[in-house]
Image (cartoon, rainbow, N blue to C red):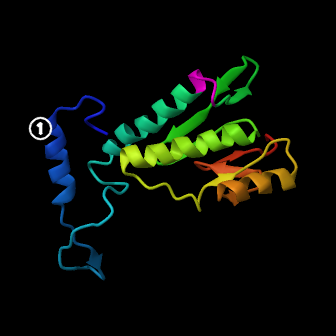
């Protein structure tokens, strides 16, 4: 992913070495455990966690391009009629699309492409389908066909309520 964004080979190798050669120890009851190699890459709080934002930009570009091509329509919000297709904050993403099977399938395909390109694995069992102005049966059908969980509004996104009546 870093190479795709134009980072030089030498820099990419440095970052790879930093990530793949890391050894950590954990304090248990105030005493350090023996050092071990983490198996799952970067975690929140890691000094190199900013790299996740570089990789997440790849998903942003895929979604923006899909919107430009009319494959994902997004949602119109506010009095200024702003059209948004997604919101991202580090490893949290919310995607807005029409309740049409073709558009939802496009979103799923974009996420699978992102997995292949980035090497990151999306946990589809933590992914949910929410419907605005749709019947519960319709939303459950989409969730089932996409292998996502069915969710009801309101929900909390980054601690903020979405779909709830404003105070």
84 in relation to 1, above or below? above
Which residue is more in the foreground, 51 or 157?
Answer: 51
* Magenta span includes 90: no
Is 99 on the left-hand or right-hand side of 156? Answer: right
Q: Residues within 10 Å of mark 1 (few under 14, many from 20)?
A: few
Secondary structure state at the residue bearing disc 1: helix
Residue 57: image location, x then y, percent: 42, 35
Figure check: 101 above or below 152: above
Q: Residue furthest left?
A: 10
Residue 143 position within the rendered picture, expressed as x and y whole percent measured from the top left: 71, 55
The C terminus sits in image quarter: top right
Residue drawn where x is 78% and y is 57% of the image: 140
Q: Main secondary structure of the magenta part?
A: loop
- The answer to whether 138 appears left or right of 63 in the picture is right
Q: In the image, what residue occupies the spot 65% across and 58% down?
A: 148
30, 85: nearer the viewer: 85
What percent of the width, then of the height, locates residue 33? Answer: 22, 79
Point 72% across, 17% down: residue: 80
Magenta stretch encompasses residue 68? yes
Q: Is residue 90 visible?
A: no
| Image location of residue 116, percent across then percent down | 41, 48
Residue drawn 35% across the image and 57% down it: 43
Q: Which residue is mark 1?
A: 10
What span is colored magenta in the figure? 67-71
Q: Is residue 30 visible?
A: yes
């Amino acid at each position: 992913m870093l190479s795709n964004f134009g980072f030089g080979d030498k820099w990419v190798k440095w970052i790879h070495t930093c990530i793949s050669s890391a050894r950590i120890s954990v304090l248990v009851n105030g005493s350090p455990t023996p050092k071990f190699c983490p198996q799952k890459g970067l975690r929140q709080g890691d000094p190199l966690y900013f790299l996740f934002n570089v990789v997440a930009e790849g998903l942003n570009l895929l979604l923006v391009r899909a919107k430009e091509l009319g494959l994902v329509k997004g949602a119109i919000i506010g009095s200024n009629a702003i059209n948004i297709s997604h919101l991202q904050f580090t490893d949290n993403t919310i995607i807005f699309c029409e309740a049409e099977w073709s558009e939802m399938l496009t979103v799923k395909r974009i996420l699978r492409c992102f997995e292949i390109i980035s090497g990151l694995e999306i946990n589809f069992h933590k992914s949910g389908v929410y419907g605005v102005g749709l019947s519960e049966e319709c939303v459950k059908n989409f969730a089932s066909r996409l292998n996502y969980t069915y969710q009801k509004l309101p929900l909390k996104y980054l601690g903020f309520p979405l779909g709830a009546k404003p105070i």
